[in-house]
Amino acid sequence: MFRSLPAFGGDQRVVAEVVRNIMDGKTNNTGSITLAVGAAVTTTLTDRRIGPDSVIVFVPASAAANADATRVYASAQGQGTATVNHAANVTANKTYRYAIIG
């Protein structure tokens, strides 16, 4: 995790560091998830940064996830949680990286 600012800002050095990190793409809005194995067709994603209107983008992060033609998407989002829909997973290690926007 990268440094964030207090609710009412910070000193100039801290603000400059945070802004520089943002410009370098370090925005504290990423994570990873491994899909449930077995007959399940959903996996719960828990992340405090998720909101009801967030956009969650998934990118395969393992060979098993990349080889799978299944579409992975988030549904039933709420504050801090989303349901990730996917096909039944008979292969372990289907891992995805995700970015939360909004």
Image (spheres, rainbow, N blue to C red):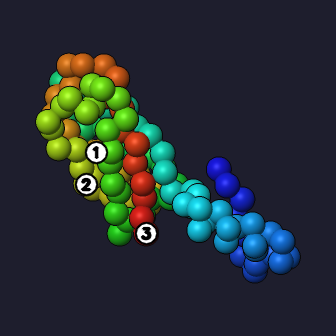
Quickly name the residue at label 2: 75
Seen in the picture, residue 8 relative to 51 is either above or below; the reply is below
The x, y position of residue 67, in whole percent, is 20, 29
Label 3 SS: loop
Disc 2 vs disc 1: Cβ atoms closer than 8 Å?
A: yes
Contact, mark 1 vs mark 3 (Cβ under 8 Å): no
Q: Nearer the viewer, residue 48 or 12?
A: 12
Q: Residue at x 34, y 63 (%)?
A: 55
Location of mark 3 (residue): 102
Image side of residue 92 versus residue 51, left or right: left
Q: Is residue 8 above or below residue 60?
A: below
Residue 63 placement: quadrant: top left
Label 3, label 2: how far apart the Cα atoms are: 15 Å
Quarter occupied by residue 54: bottom left
Q: Residue at x 85, y 76 (%)?
A: 11
Numbered marks: total? 3
Q: Amino acid type of disc 1?
A: Val
Residue type, mark 3 in image: Gly
